[in-house]
Amino acid sequence: ITEDVVKATAGNTSCGKEVMMLLLRRQKANVTITEEVVKAAARNEENGKQVVMLLLEKRGDDVQITEEVVMAATGNWRSGNEVMILLLEKR
């Protein structure tokens, strides 16, 4: 599974959480959680909180909280506050 597929899933505003759950459940070894994936999830205005929470719960050791990830969350006008809380709790 390519990074682009995982990134698109993380940023999917209609069913990102559900598709990410499916990928992590069925293709766990083939899903790499990169900074770009976490940024896409943090920017996701509809499902960002749920996708970030899922990534932290299922693959927390792989989630990199970088300055760019934090910036992506701050640009999320709808759920950025909730995403930021999750990221800060992880740190």
Image: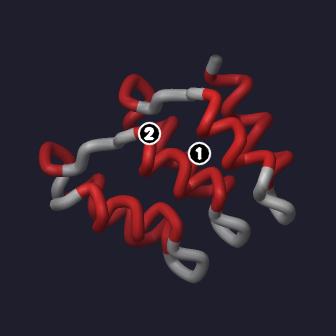
Mark 2 highlights which residue? Answer: 35
Q: Residue drawn 40% across and 60% down?
A: 7
At label 1, which amino acid type do we have?
Met
19 in relation to 27, above or below:
below
Residue in the foreground of this view, choosing between 69 and 79? 69
Residue bearing mark 1: 53
Above or below residue 77? Residue 70 is above
**Contact (CB < 8 A) between labels 1 and 2?**
no
Q: Secondary structure at mark 1?
A: helix
Percent position (x, y) of residue 65? 56, 28
Q: Nearer the viewer, residue 18 or 71?
A: 71
With 66 as the anchor, is 86 left or right in this view? right
Q: Residue 90's mark?
A: none
Counting residues from the N terminus, which is met first, the one under dot 1 or under dot 2?
Answer: 2
Which residue is located at x 72 percent, y 67 percent? 45
Front of the two marks 1 and 2: 2
- Image quadrant holding the N terminus, namely bottom left
What is the quadrant of residue 61 in the picture? top left
Residue for point 53% across, 57% down: 40
Q: Amino acid at mark 2?
A: Glu
Q: CA distance from mark 1 to mark 2?
A: 15 Å
Lateral position of residue 86 relative to residue 2, left or right:
right
In the rendered view, how is the structure colored?
secondary structure
Local crowd size for mark 1, using a 10 Å CA cut-off: few (<14), some (14–19), many (≥20): many
Q: Position of residue 71 (x, y in %)?
A: 71, 41
